Image: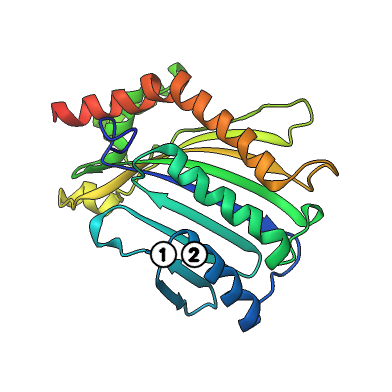
Amino acid sequence: MNPYGSLCDDFYVNMTLSTEMDLPNNREALLHFYERVQKSYPTMRNFYCREKGDFVLEEDKGRGQYRWSSIELRRICSGQVNPDRLEDALGQHRLILDLAPYMLSVSPLDCEALDLLFGFDFTYRGNHNQLVAEALGVSPAMEKLAEAAGGTVIAFEPSLTVAIDDDCRLQCRLSVETRTNAYQVRTGEYTEEQLSVYLTARQYGSLAPDASYVATLETLAKVCRDMVEGYVIDGVLRPLARTIALR
């Protein structure tokens, strides 16, 4: 059972390792890497190359619950949509980060940033921006502006980034992404779109000599879990779910 299934329509956990140097793109290295990933997750058997040269290995998306991974020019990405347990997704990310230094020559010195994202999607037909403003509120300084000229909000995507450590290399960002445009508001013709809440923990820069990617992932996972359980559920997810249910 999706650990946050009662709070949103879809939940996913994505990891992104951004490197300073280009990643290997030779056939042997890429296939060897993904063959090793497939040994742990045999149902990841859809392998293909996107037009811009990214390589992807993923499970069948038809069930609405699937794993995926991609290798881009300077990024290694991994994700799981609607995992039964949070640990299922983190285990996949650990494997990717454990293999990358040896199979893709990714040194801890080569790290530009390591991200862990908890994503929450809500399916909603209507003005996403107005919904977010009603569910989460706006700051007192902007409240009068939001009420002006009939109070139709057409752009509102609140976000906040905080530093977890003194040198600001470990950060956490909460953001809301809406998918309603002015044309839809003007015509009243809406389609069902995903309103997304993202909670991202990010470690910037090269890792310390005694650090590893897997250990850094554990730190990011703790930040995300603490923020979601301590603040995001009651402050963002439940208000959005409640407001959608009332419409």
Label 1 crowd bin: few (<14), some (14–19), many (20+), radius 10 Å: few
Mark 2 element type: helix
Q: Amino acid at mark 1?
A: Pro
Label 2 crowd bin: few (<14), some (14–19), many (20+), radius 10 Å: few
Above or below, comparing residue 138 to residue 13 in the picture: above
Q: Which residue is mark 1?
A: 42
| CA gap, disc 2 and disc 1 | 6 Å
The image shows residue 13 at horizontal and vertical percentages of 45, 45
Residue 235 is left or right of residue 206, and the answer is: left
Q: Which mark is residue 202?
A: none
- Residue 153 in view here: no
For image coordinates 29% across by 29% down, the residue present is: 240
Instruction: Write down the quadrant of residue 163 in the picture.
Output: top right
Which residue is at the front of the view, 99 or 76?
Answer: 99
Q: Amino acid at mark 2?
A: Lys
User: Which quadrant holds the C terminus?
Assistant: top left
The image shows residue 135 at horizontal and vertical percentages of 30, 25
Which residue is at the front of the view, 177 or 5?
Answer: 5
The image shows residue 57 at horizontal and vertical percentages of 46, 68
Residue 116 is left or right of residue 99, and the answer is: left
For image coordinates 83% across by 41% down, the residue present is: 210
Which residue is at the front of the view, 87 or 119?
Answer: 87
Circle count = 2
For image coordinates 57% across by 29% down, the residue present is: 222
The image shows residue 226 at horizontal and vertical percentages of 52, 24
The reply to whether discs 2 and 1 touch (Cβ–Cβ < 8 Å) is: yes
Q: Which residue is mark 2?
A: 39
